[in-house]
Image (tube, rainbow, N blue to C red):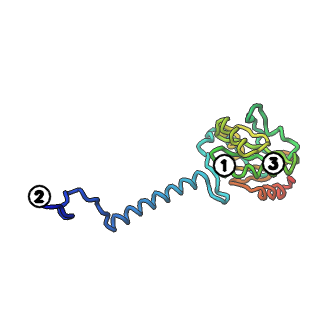
Amino acid sequence: MGPPRTPDSEEPGSRRPKLDPLSLAALTAVSLAIAIFATLVILKVFGSEDDSNAVDVTDAIESDEGSSGSFEVGEPAPDVTFEILGGGEGSIADYGGTPLVVNFWSSTCAPCLAEMPDFESVHSELDGAVAFLGVDVTDTEQAGLDMVEQTGVTYPNARDPRAEVLGAFGGISLPRTVLVSADGIVIDTHNGQMSAEELREALEDGGLT
């Protein structure tokens, strides 16, 4: 029987290696860099709290001339047609004679999800004096229907699976809101999340209420 083992006589490799201060600092720096990168990715997808909090859908918009066209405040709104979520068809011309709020959204857009109940609140307050139309961009029909149910909006919502309607209204990001006068003229546009108060103010400033 050999002599008892001491810490100095342990077999090579049996000890758990210790990190020296330099290695520990390097590991910490790498972990911090990964955390920062993840945060930037989240902000890119879901946006922030200001007017830049929009989801970029440029890649979904077709590059042909008919998909985007010219679009400026003060010009007539494009008379596009669309399929209604849940069945049926419609067009912007259907809303002639009534001021119109057009709100573009998607189920993958967190700011859209946050603002839709506020839009429903203003819609209910105005009681038909201003029409509201939601436009679901690049979703499956079921995803759109699920979001309508989740947010509780009761106004009509159209489908825009290839972002053609969004492109016709000059949009490249979500959420996007366009205000149209009773005679079909674009009064204002807004990119990013809007609160109920901001929407009310925009309608008042545009002379729509």
Identify the residue under disc 3: 180
**Mark 2 vs mark 3, CA separation in Å:** 94 Å
Identify the residue under disc 2: 2
Residue drawn at (61%, 46%), measured in percent from left and top? 58
- Tell me the crowding category of disc 3: few under 14, some 14 to 19, or many 20 or more residues within 10 angstroms, Cα based: many
Q: Kindly identify the amino acid type of the residue bearing the numbered disc 1.
A: Leu
* Image coordinates for residue 115, horizontal then vertical, percent: 72, 52
Residue drawn at (67%, 58%), measured in percent from left and top? 51
The residue at the far left in this view is: 1
Query: Quick check: 168 above or below 190?
Result: above
- Judged from the image, the secondary structure of the residue bearing numbered disc 1 is strand
> Along the horizontal axis of the image, is 115 left or right of 64?
right
Query: Quick check: 149 above or below 119?
Result: above
> Along the horizontal axis of the image, is 171 left or right of 205?
left
- Residue 196 circle label: none
**Mark 1 vs mark 3, CA separation in Å:** 18 Å
* Image coordinates for residue 124, horizontal then vertical, percent: 84, 48
* Image coordinates for residue 181, horizontal then vertical, percent: 84, 48
Residue drawn at (49%, 56%), measured in percent from left and top? 37
Question: Is there any visible trace of residue 18 in the rendered image?
Answer: yes
The residue at the far bottom in this view is: 21
Q: Which of 103 and 116 is in front in this view?
A: 116
* Image coordinates for residue 202, horizontal then vertical, percent: 80, 57
**Mark 1 vs mark 2, CA separation in Å:** 76 Å
Q: Kindly identify the amino acid type of the residue bearing the numbered disc 2.
A: Gly
Identify the residue under disc 1: 174
- State the quadrant of the N terminus: bottom left
- State the quadrant of the C terminus: bottom right
Which mark lies nearer to you, 1 or 3? 1
- 1 or 3: tag closer to the N-terminus: 1
Q: Which of 83 and 5 is in front in this view?
A: 5
Q: Are marks 1 and 2 in contact (CB under 8 Å)?
A: no
